Amino acid sequence: MSIELDTRAKLLNATIVAISSGGESSVRVSTVATAVGVREPSVYHFFKNREALVEAAQIERYRRSYLEMILPFEAAALMADSWEDFERSVRKIFAAVYSPERAALRIIRMNVMGAAQSSPAIAAAVIDINHETAESLARVMTFGQEKGWVTKDLDAMALSYWAIGQINGRVMAEMNPSQVDLDAWTKVSIEAVLGVYRWKETK
């Protein structure tokens, strides 16, 4: 990584930390510069203004929230050579993304999608990241359809967006854990996903 790209990445990381701890309003360009060890004017070499810095950080937060989830799942699922292997991959990834430690990532997505309502730049990036994530899942769905494990009656891309909606929809239950059994919610969601996928067993 070049020095310029490294500095830009450090500025984004420092801004992400600030947003995570105090929200967008807590971001101060001078504080971000100090955290990275550069002078404040250097920040404007990479970002037009404070708003552009915040937008870039929000976009990066959103992108990272999906990255660790989708790539391992696609790699594992595409190696499956039986329905049982495919099902194990689905159960494993959904159990992982529904783990308590990943709840914060869903909150980040909600936060960034909220910010997208007033920022065309964030909105455009969120749309692109959503599509890239869905495309990755769609490759898995298409693979399963070709193997006869996933129903061919449903569009692979629509199926992928629906599965992502299942994951992000957990936020509603996580906001009210005293009235929702999260383990029961996980079971319902995983069985619903597999119920849609489980073509061979129902035909």
Image (cartoon, rainbow, N blue to C red):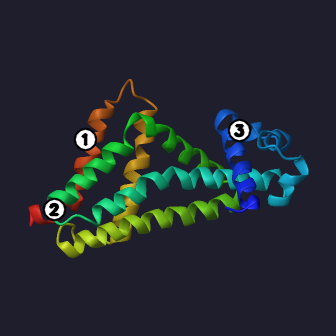
Residue 138 located left or right of residue 152:
right
Q: Position of residue 90 (x, y in %)?
A: 27, 54
Q: Which residue is mark 1?
A: 187
Q: Amino acid at mark 1?
A: Lys
> Does dot 1 land on a helix, a strand or a loop?
helix
Q: Amino acid at mark 2?
A: Trp
Position above or below: 122 against 149 = above
Q: Residues within 10 Å of mark 2 (few under 14, many from 20)?
A: some
What residue appears at the point 37 percent right and 38 percent down from the top-left corner?
A: 99
Residue 7 location (% of width, % of height): 75, 54
Q: CA distance from mark 3 to mark 1?
A: 35 Å
Query: Farthest front residue?
Result: 2
- Mark number displayed over residue 83: 2
- Report x, y in % for residue 155: 32, 72
Could you tell which of marks 3 and 1 lies nearer the N-terminus?
3
* Viewer-proximal residue among 147 and 14: 14
